[in-house]
Image: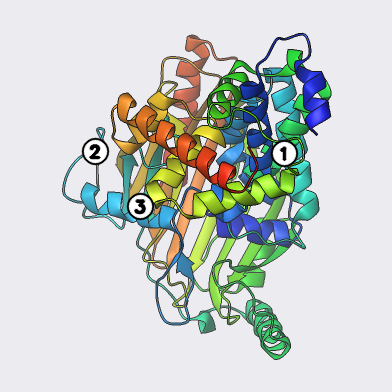
């Protein structure tokens, strides 16, 4: 290693100090992940339950602040079971990145509410947990067990899940362009924690709009303090804004839209909660990035978003 | 998507896990690689990182997904530095090497890299959490002093002062072990 580094710096008149620095930099590659991980250690969130990461603790600390005030122009829809906020300096790895968080408050359900086939997956989780206990090799308690199955259509996935009230949200003029995936998650003991499906479509003139939808159902075994999703964005490139949308039926949805001077892809996200189910839609418009087309994209995505929300 | 869900996807061999990994950490990995390599090499390095993650999970099940991925990325980047020699190093990499070298004027040629790694790890474990983070973020992730000042709420002078003291302490620790 040293000789190779010597060769590297030959002719560059680099000092021995520089070389020593490079050796130390290289040696640091071997440091354990727990030493280079910025987040502090995990903390238990309940008896026999999943653990929350410190990053999530920070997230909820910020969320608590946001419940009584505004941060970076964020808005909180206090009366809704959906809220959003921007947290700055929340990412210890990259202070330039800001996050917008969408927090859900759906009702949590009993695992018994799912159909036989999902329960069979849970039974498989429990069987795994039993064997792991017998072998003395327990599954990590901070990582959910995962099981994924693909379906040709959203309807097939819904039939498989067998949960009353869970419905297809694709609009008639959307064309499926990717498989529908079902994810079933469990905890260390093998108990069912979450079931979710995601589907992908294309629509619009020239099918320029890509649509991804998700539906998530959280069980009583989900022990994180709350549910939600956080996504990074960079304020030097764009900003985001959350808007409330009330449907003709009086239901309130949340729409997250970007605000920026330029850019290539215009996108928009929508969230609705119906009983125990969190429905999410992500819309992307593949444009050339010119302002004229961006205006068209905004109108087109808004139209699709409103049509999607009006079905609730 | 949470790390736990990304890991679950990867463990079930679902390629969406890689997509979500890129979605969540791609930019950070690119920044890390570009602090060591020129942009073109850095982009290839990040792609190689995703491949390595895909090939290693499972069987591995890392506790810290970003640190695990970043470590692969940093290692791959350093391998490229060695292959590509001086012309293929980034300015940040040279700056950090120079700065860090000030703590140890000359590391003995007899010192194996593993020994050096172990000594640095011991040194870091003895540090307070905040100081460890400042050191790691500067010399492992390559964050600038300005970024650190913003993240930790200190003036840049204080960050420089903390880093200076940490480098001196590292030098003392290495000297104690006969490595310098």
Q: Secondary structure at mark 2?
A: loop
Task: Check the residue under mark 3 and report the chain it is in.
Answer: A
Disc on the earlier residue, 3 or 2:
3
In the image, which disc is placed on residue A58? 3
Label placed on residue B75: 1
**Chain letter for mark 2:** A
Pointers 3 and 2 in contact (C-beta within 8 Å)? no
Task: From the viewer's perspective, tell me whether residue B154 is left or right of residue A306.
Answer: left
Q: Is residue A244 left or right of residue B178?
A: left
Snapshot quadrant of residue A273 = bottom left
Whether labels 3 and 2 belong to a single chain: the reply is: yes
Residue at the (42%, 57%) spot, across then down: A54
Residue B1 appears in the picture as rendered = no
Q: Are marks 3 and 1 on the same chain?
A: no
Q: Is residue B140 left or right of residue A177?
A: left
Q: Position of residue A80 (x, y in %)?
A: 27, 55
Give the image's coloring scheme: rainbow
Q: Residue at x 60, y 69 (%)?
A: A185
Secondary structure type for disc 3: helix
Q: CA distance from mark 3 to mark 2?
A: 15 Å
In what element is the residue under mark 1? helix
Q: How many angstroms separate mark 3 from mark 1 (CA)?
A: 29 Å
Badge number at residue A217: none
Residue A68 x/y as whole percent: 16, 49
How many numbered marks, from 0 up? 3
Instruction: Say the numbered circle drawn on residue A71.
Output: 2
Callout 1: chain: B
Front disc: 1 or 2 = 1
Q: Is residue A134 above or below residue A45?
A: below
Image coordinates for residue A204, horizontal then vertical, percent: 59, 30
Label 1: how many residues lie within 10 Å, few (<14), some (14-19) or many (20+)? some
In depth, the one of B100 and B35 nearer the eye is B100
């Amino acid at each position: 290693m040293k000789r190779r580094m010597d060769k590297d710096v030959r002719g560059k008149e680099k000092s021995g100090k520089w070389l020593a620095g490079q050796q130390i930099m290289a040696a640091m590659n071997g440091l354990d992940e727990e030493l280079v991980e910025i987040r502090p250690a995990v903390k238990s969130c309940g008896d026999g339950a999943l653990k929350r990461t410190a990053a999530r603790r920070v997230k909820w600390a910020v969320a608590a602040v946001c419940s009584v005030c505004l941060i970076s122009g964020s808005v909180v829809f206090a009366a809704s079971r959906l809220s959003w906020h921007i947290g700055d300096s929340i990412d210890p790895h990259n202070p330039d990145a800001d996050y917008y968080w969408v927090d859900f408050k759906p009702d949590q359900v009993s695992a018994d509410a799912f159909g036989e086939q999902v329960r069979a997956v849970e039974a498989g989780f429990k069987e795994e947990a039993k064997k792991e206990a017998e072998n003395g090799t327990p599954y990590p308690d901070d990582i959910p067990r995962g099981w994924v199955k693909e379906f040709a259509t959203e309807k097939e996935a819904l039939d498989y899940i067998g949960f009353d009230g869970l419905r297809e949200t694709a609009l008639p003029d959307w064309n499926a362009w990717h498989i529908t995936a079902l994810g079933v998650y469990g905890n260390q003991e093998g108990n069912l924690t979450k079931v979710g499906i995601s589907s992908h479509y294309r629509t619009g003139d020239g099918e320029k709009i890509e649509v991804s939808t998700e539906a998530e159902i959280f069980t009583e075994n989900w022990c994180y303090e709350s549910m939600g999703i956080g996504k990074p964005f960079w304020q030097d490139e764009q900003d985001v804004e959350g808007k409330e949308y009330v449907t003709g039926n009086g239901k309130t949805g949340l729409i997250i839209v970007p605000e920026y001077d330029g850019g290539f892809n215009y996108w928009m996200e929508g969230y609705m909660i119906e009983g125990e189910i969190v429905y999410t839609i992500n819309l992307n418009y593949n444009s050339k990035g010119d302002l004229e087309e961006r205006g068209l994209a905004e109108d087109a995505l808004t139209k699709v978003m409103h049509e999607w929300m009006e079905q609730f | 998507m949470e790390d736990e869900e990304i890991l679950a996807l990867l463990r079930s061999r679902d390629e969406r896990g890689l997509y979500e990994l890129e979605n969540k950490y791609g930019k950070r990995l690119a920044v890390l690689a570009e602090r060591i390599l020129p942009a073109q090499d850095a982009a290839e390095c990040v792609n190689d990182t995703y491949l390595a993650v895909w090939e290693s999970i499972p069987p591995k099940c890392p506790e810290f997904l970003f640190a695990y991925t970043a470590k692969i990325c940093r290692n791959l980047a350093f391998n490229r530095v060695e292959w590509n020699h001086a012309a293929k190093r980034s300015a940040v990499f040279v700056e950090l090497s120079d700065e860090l070298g000030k703590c140890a004027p000359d590391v003995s040629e007899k010192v194996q890299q593993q020994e050096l790694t172990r000594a640095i790890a011991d040194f870091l474990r003895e540090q307070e959490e905040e100081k460890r983070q400042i050191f790691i973020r500067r010399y492992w992730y390559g964050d600038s002093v300005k970024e650190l000042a913003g993240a930790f709420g200190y003036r840049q002078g204080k960050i420089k002062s903390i880093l200076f003291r940490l480098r001196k302490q590292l030098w003392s620790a290495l000297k104690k072990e006969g490595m310098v």
